[in-house]
Each structure stands twice: as structure tokens, then as C-alpha cells.
């Protein structure tokens, strides 16, 4: 009995050792996380983003942006609307009025929201990353740049200081970097590094946690560029990501990541 | 599936026609591990039986948060079940089954303190005699609250519980 008590006591004592606090910025991935069980709301929904931004010490949020066929910008992650929303097909082919009726097939039936509904939610010291999804997967074509630019410029004309654009397609990088602060999203460190050398206006890269080492992060930071890591879901991957000392992490479990703030 | 469950329950009642299990048991200690939406929990507790009713309380810790995130996540549960099946299979084995309610509360501290409260509709299944293996399953509503810079935020969602464990009857 005494042994059991001692064992229990030491386990508790060991488990309560203090974490090292970090200055690294912590962002929610599409709100409170993408496809993670402990997120109470669907990713990219207003409820999820509001909750993420309300967390004390949350540095902001990353959201996925797609454009409908009338130029309205919506938050939506997947290539197709089928299965997870009340609509079928691709968002890029839908009208604004069709999209206004759309909701996620969840218990809460959260509505799909426009980007303009999110902008007022961002706090003074928080950042908003817009991951632009520019390929229409139904037609396998890239959406119209000028229409996208016009829609986004209209929304961001008043305040762009806290808003950053993420692109995973290099074809838009040069022309986008002329207008907005841009990060390049890649799974390949060397591709990202070369791109930052060739496009000095790009601010940095967004890269999968497993695809980069801490020495590689240092080499990008030595170019005076920033590195943000994503695909960080478990407590172990949060610890690993923070150890690499990036500028920020975009995590699917922001509650767990805030333990280190 | 529903027919199979009904057939299973009837087969227990008809197939094992021995006397009901001794209902004088008044203190049972329990330990179990449960999977819930927010974490895995490791619980210790005690329960008592009065005829078909069983009431218990458990305290525990969130395993992932306490042992892997090195923060602290205490958990408390209040359970009540109506064991309408209490059947002896043989001298060493008995089966207990019934629906019930699980109320639980959890806290979790990061840059703020998250408080969780759940109300789950549940069932329990136990097998054994003095030592028993038990399983609880449940589904219901969960509330999350925390203090933000703009005030208290309360969110609502669903929660579930899948628990397995062992219990020991102190007085039979």
C-alpha cells in the first residue's frame, strides 16, 4: 500500500515539473484545429475562429480562403464541398447566394463564412494568415488572379498590418508579393529556401514540422526571413516544433500549445 | 444490431436462472481508464449499491495533459446506475448491467484555466464477483468555459466516455 502511495506521489510530482516558457508565436490552424477531435467546432467556422482568437496569449489564426464564381471570398479548406458540407462540387463554381445557404454537416451545423466576417475579429496584437486556395479542382484550372486580387484588395484596403497571405503555388508569388505581405507554403525546405532567395519580397515560408530541421530554420532566419511550422497536433510534436525555434507554430491543438506561452 | 442486443439480454435472463447476485455489497473500490473527447483519464473511486441502484464517485487525472504536456488536469466524476440485470452465472462469476448517468468536471490550466462539465447518458457492464471487470459507455453534452480578455466564454459540444477498469468489493 505504501509502495503504491509513493509511486502515485512521485508520478504526480514528476508530471508537475514546469515547462519552459517560449516567445514563439502560437496560431490556431483554421481556428481551433483541423480535423482534431477536441475542437468543439468545424475548422474555418466563425465559432472556431472566435474561440481561437479569444484564448489568452493566442497570437492569431490561419484560415483557408477560396473564391466563389462571383468573386466573394469564403473560408473553406477542402477541394470539394461534398461530404462535409451541405453542397456538392467546388466552391469556385458556386454563386454567392448558393454559398450563403451552405453549412457543415456537423452536430452544430456551423455556416460557411465570408472572409469579411472574420477581419473584424482580429485583435490589435494578433495576426491573420490567409492561405489562398487558388486551384479549382473540378476544372483543374487556376482561378482568375485579377478577380481574386480585386476581391481581396477591397477587403484589405483599410487595414493590412495584421494580415498575411500564404501561397502554395509559386505562379502567383511574384505578383502577389508586390501587393501583400506573402509567405510561401511548401513541404520541401530546398524549394522554399531557393524561392526566398529568388523572391526577396516574400517574407518567409510556412512548412510542415517534419519537413525541416532546426539548423535549416536558422539558415532561413539568417536571410532575415521568417519560418512558421504547421502539421502540429500532438503534445510531442508541439514540444519538437518549439525546440526548433521557428518564428511561430500553426497548431491543431492550440490549447495544448498555450501551455508553453 | 438492436435485435442482437435484446436477444443477448434475454439469453442471460433465461439461460442463467440461478439466484440473483448478493445485493448486500455496500462498498466497492474502482480504478479505470477512460477515453473521452478531450483526453484519456485515469480514475480511482468508490461506489455503493442499494438494491438495483448504484452510486459512486471517482477522482482522476487527464493522462495526456498531466503526463505528456506537464500541466495539471484533475477530473471528478459522479455516477449513478440502475442495474436491472444482476445475475450470477456460476459461483465465481456474475453479470451486472444497467443504464445510468455520469456527471463529470475537469479543469486544465494553460494561459487560462479551462473548466469542463459533462452530463452523459450511460450504461455499465460488469463481470466477476469480488473482483470485477467493468465497462462504462456514455454520450452527452459537454460545456467548456474559460476567462478571455473580453470576459467569460462558454462553449457547448458533445462528449463521450468509453471506460474500462476493475473493481473490488470490500464488504460482501
Image (spheres, coloured by chain):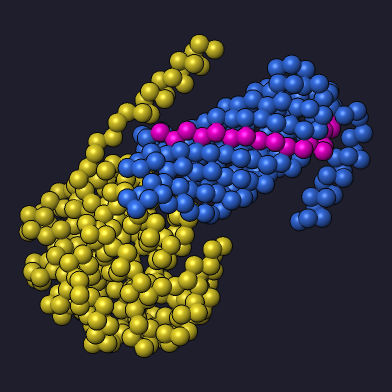
Chain colours: A yellow, B blue
User: Is A124 in front, or is A2?
Assistant: A124
Vertical placement of A249 versus A2: above or below? below
> Residue A184, how many percent across, how many down?
21, 67
Q: Name the outermost residue toward the front.
A: B151
User: Is A78 in front, or is A22?
Assistant: A22
Q: Which residue is drawn at 68% across and 33% down?
A: B134
Vertical placement of A252 versus B136: above or below? below
Q: How many labels does the image show?
A: 0
Q: Name the outermost residue toward the top.
A: A2
> Residue B89, how many percent across, how many down?
84, 31
User: Is B7 in front, or is A102?
Assistant: A102
Q: Do we see residue B12 in this rendering? A: yes
In the rendered image, which quarter contains the N terminus of chain B? bottom right
Is B85 in the magenta? Answer: yes
> Residue A201, how many percent across, how many down?
10, 70
Tell me if B151 is positioned left or right of B54 in this view: left
Is A197 in the magenta? Answer: no
Q: Which residue is drawn at 38% across and 50% down?
A: B151
Q: Residue at x 80, y 52 (%)?
A: B4
In the rendered image, which quarter contains the C terminus of chain B? top right
Tell me if B108 is positioned left or right of B159 in this view: left
Q: Tell me the magenta residue range.
A: B72-88
Tell me if A38 is positioned left or right of B165 in this view: left
Q: Do we see residue B166 in this rendering? A: no
Amino acid at each position: 500500500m505504501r509502495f503504491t502511495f509513493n509511486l502515485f506521489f512521485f508520478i504526480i510530482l514528476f508530471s508537475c515539473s514546469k515547462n519552459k516558457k517560449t516567445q514563439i508565436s502560437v496560431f490556431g490552424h483554421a481556428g481551433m484545429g483541423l480535423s482534431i477531435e477536441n475542437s468543439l467546432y468545424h475548422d474555418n467556422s466563425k465559432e472556431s475562429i472566435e474561440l481561437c482568437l479569444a484564448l489568452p496569449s493566442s497570437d492569431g489564426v490561419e484560415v483557408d480562403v477560396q473564391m466563389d464564381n462571383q468573386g466573394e471570398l469564403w473560408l473553406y479548406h477542402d477541394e470539394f464541398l461534398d461530404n462535409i458540407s451541405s453542397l456538392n462540387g467546388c466552391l469556385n463554381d458556386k454563386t454567392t447566394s448558393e454559398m450563403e445557404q451552405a453549412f457543415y454537416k456537423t452536430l452544430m451545423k456551423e455556416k460557411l463564412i465570408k472572409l469579411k466576417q472574420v477581419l473584424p475579429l482580429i485583435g490589435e496584437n494578433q495576426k491573420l494568415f490567409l492561405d489562398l486556395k487558388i486551384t479549382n479542382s473540378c476544372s483543374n484550372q487556376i482561378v482568375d488572379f485579377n478577380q481574386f486580387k480585386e476581391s481581396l484588395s477591397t477587403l484589405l484596403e483599410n487595414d493590412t498590418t495584421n494580415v498575411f497571405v500564404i501561397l502554395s503555388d509559386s505562379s502567383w508569388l511574384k505578383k502577389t508579393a508586390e501587393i501583400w505581405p506573402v509567405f510561401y507554403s511548401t513541404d520541401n525546405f530546398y524549394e522554399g529556401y531557393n524561392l526566398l532567395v529568388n523572391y526577396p519580397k516574400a517574407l518567409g515560408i510556412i512548412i510542415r514540422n517534419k519537413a525541416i530541421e532546426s539548423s535549416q530554420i536558422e539558415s532561413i532566419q539568417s536571410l532575415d526571413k521568417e519560418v512558421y511550422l504547421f502539421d502540429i497536433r500532438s503534445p510531442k510534436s508541439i514540444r519538437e516544433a518549439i525546440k526548433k525555434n521557428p518564428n511561430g507554430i500553426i497548431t491543431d491543438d492550440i490549447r495544448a500549445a498555450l501551455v508553453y506561452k | 444490431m438492436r435485435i442482437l442486443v435484446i436477444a443477448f439480454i434475454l439469453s442471460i435472463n433465461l439461460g442463467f436462472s440461478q439466484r440473483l447476485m448478493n445485493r448486500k455489497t455496500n462498498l466497492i473500490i474502482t480504478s479505470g481508464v477512460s477515453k473521452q473527447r478531450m483526453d484519456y483519464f485515469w480514475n480511482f473511486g468508490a461506489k455503493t449499491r442499494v438494491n438495483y441502484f448504484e452510486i459512486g464517485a471517482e477522482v482522476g487525472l487527464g493522462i495526456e495533459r498531466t503526463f505528456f504536456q506537464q500541466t495539471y488536469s484533475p477530473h471528478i466524476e459522479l455516477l449513478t446506475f440502475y442495474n436491472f440485470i444482476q445475475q450470477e452465472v456460476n459461483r465465481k462469476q456474475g453479470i451486472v448491467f444497467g443504464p445510468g448517468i455520469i456527471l463529470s468536471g475537469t479543469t486544465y490550466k494553460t494561459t487560462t484555466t479551462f473548466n469542463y462539465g459533462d452530463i452523459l447518458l450511460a450504461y455499465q457492464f460488469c463481470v466477476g464477483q469480488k473482483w470485477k471487470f467493468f465497462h462504462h459507455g456514455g454520450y452527452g453534452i459537454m460545456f467548456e468555459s474559460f476567462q478571455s480578455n473580453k470576459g467569460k466564454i462558454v462553449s457547448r459540444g458533445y462528449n463521450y466516455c468509453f471506460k474500462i477498469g476493475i473493481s473490488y468489493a470490500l464488504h460482501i
